[in-house]
């Protein structure tokens, strides 16, 4: 059975984007080692599917070249017929779709973002691992990593890495229950 991995960057105060949805603040922190990818390549080689919400998809389109050519890509949207992109499957029933995907032998799936999608999948019990890279910045406002959660979720820390540029990466496994 496959697993869903949330791999995402966050500010120290828990925001993944500014109020307008921008992630420009990610560029504001200097990386002392241009060779460091914070586990991105390892994760990318491990997954066979990437998934994201519509807002994240639209944001990635604005970055230029599509970065996920070699992967199956799924975008959750309430209006799947409003989009046409041969590189992407647009889905409006995410929980049922993902349960089938995970049961059908998908290896690992990278949840790229965003907040609404991550929150929904967490509530549905579909996220298995979270790899969250905390950047040394306090935004003071914006889009929270999770929103609208109505209960607590227990996690087990599997690994913690610190980097010379003050980034900290936390790898958690979600506990059942």
Image (spheres, grey):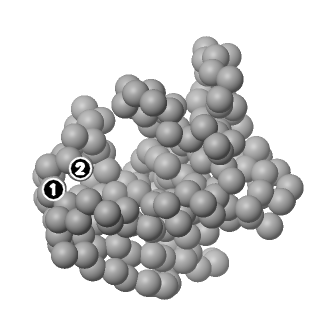
Regarding residue 133, the answer to whether it shows in the image is no
Task: Indicate the position of residue 44 as horizontal and vertical percent values.
Answer: 55, 57
Image coords of residue 43 (percent x, y):
54, 63
Dot 2 alpha-carbon crowd within 10 angstroms: few under 14, some 14 to 19, many 20 or more? some
The picture quadrant where one finds residue 124 is bottom right
Residue 41 placed where, x, y %?
49, 61
Q: Is residue 80 above or below residue 98?
A: above
In the picture, measured across the screen, residue 19 lies left or right of residue 160, that is left
Say which quadrant the C terminus sits in.
bottom right
Percent coordinates x, y for residue 13 in the rendering = 21, 61
Q: Are marks 2 and 1 in contact (CB under 8 Å)?
A: yes
Q: Nearer the viewer, residue 154 or 112?
A: 112
Residue matched to label 2: 26
C-alpha separation, residue under disc 2 versus residue under disc 1: 6 Å
- Going by the image, does 10 lie left or right of 136? right
Question: Which residue is found at the position 50% from the left and 33% from the top?
Answer: 66
- Residue at point 59% right, 45% down? 51
Whether residue 29 sits left or right of residue 101 in the image: it is left
- Name above or below for residue 72 compared with residue 177: above
Q: Is residue 57 above or below residue 149?
A: above
Q: Helix or strand or loop: what does disc 1 sit on? A: loop
Please, which residue is most extreme toward the front here?
35
Residue 83, compared with residue 68, is above or below; it is: above
Quadrant assignment for the N terminus = bottom right
Residue at numbered disc 1: 29
Tell me the crowding category of disc 1: few under 14, some 14 to 19, or many 20 or more residues within 10 angstroms, Cα based: few
Q: Element type at marker 2?
A: helix
Residue at x 60%, y 27% (from the top left corner): 78
Residue at left 61%, top 17%? 83
């Amino acid at each position: 059975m496959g697993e869903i991995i949330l791999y995402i960057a966050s500010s120290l105060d828990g925001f993944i984007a500014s109020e307008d949805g921008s992630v420009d603040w990610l560029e504001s922190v200097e990386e002392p080692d241009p060779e460091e990818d914070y586990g991105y390549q390892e994760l990318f080689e491990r997954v066979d599917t990437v998934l994201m919400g519509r807002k994240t998809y639209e944001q990635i389109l604005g970055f230029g070249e599509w970065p996920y050519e070699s992967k199956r890509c799924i975008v959750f949207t309430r209006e799947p017929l409003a989009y046409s992109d041969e590189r992407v499957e647009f889905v409006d029933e995410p929980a049922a779709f993902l349960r089938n995907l995970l049961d059908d032998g998908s290896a690992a799936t990278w949840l790229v973002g965003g907040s609404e999608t991550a929150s929904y999948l967490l509530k549905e019990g579909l996220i298995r691992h979270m790899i969250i890279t905390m950047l040394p910045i306090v935004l003071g406002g914006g889009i929270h990593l999770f929103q609208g959660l109505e209960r607590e979720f227990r996690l087990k820390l599997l690994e913690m890495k610190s980097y010379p540029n003050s980034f900290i990466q936390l790898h958690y496994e979600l506990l059942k229950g």
